[in-house]
Amino acid sequence: MKASKILKIGTNRGKPRAWVEGKFLTDAGWTRGVTYHQTIENGALVLTRDISGKKRVAGSVGRPVLDLNGGYLAPLFEGCTTFSVTHVQMWDSESGISVLTHQIVIKGVKS
């Protein structure tokens, strides 16, 4: 399953900001309190749902929020005014056991 959306890049204290909220996250199963870890892979920010993740989806029960901001986004968003956010659901069997993995992939979109 894949679902995508294009959003505007914001700023916070002079640093790029990716703000994702509401129905997109709810439909993807990313509700308030879901934990995840984040990595940068192939020029994209990848958020992987993980019960032992150190980061959490904020917001409220009806309106989950991912508020991502900081200097680490600058190279990913260089020359961009918008970003794509994609929910990817896939089976991962690297460890020999099939596990359903949920990821949010954020990537700058050049105009």
Image (cartoon, rainbow, N blue to C red):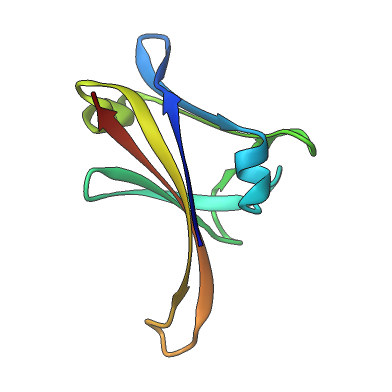
95 lies above or below 34:
below
User: Residue 95 at x, y = what percent?
Assistant: 41, 84
The residue lying at 66 percent from left, 49 percent from top is 27
Residue 58: image x %, image y %? 66, 35
Residue furthest toward the top? Answer: 13
Residue 46 placed where, x, y %?
A: 39, 49
Q: Position of residue 84 (x, y in %)?
A: 39, 37
Give the camera-side residue of 37 and 60: 60
| Identity of the residue drawn at 20% across and 21% down | 79
Farthest bottom residue in view? 96
Q: Residue at x 28, y 31 (%)?
A: 109
Question: Does 21 appear above or below 10?
Answer: below
Q: Residue at x 23, y 43 (%)?
A: 43
Residue 30 makes an appearance in the image:
no
In this view, 18 is above or below 57: above
Q: Quadrant of residue 60?
A: top right
Q: Nearer the viewer, residue 42 or 53?
A: 42
Residue 60 falls left or right of residue 45: right
Q: In the rendered image, is residue 80 in sight?
A: yes
Residue 85: image quadrant is top left
Q: Quadrant of residue 6?
A: top left
- The C terminus - image quarter: top left
Judge whether 46 appears above or below 80 on screen: below
Q: How many numbered marks does the figure carry?
A: 0
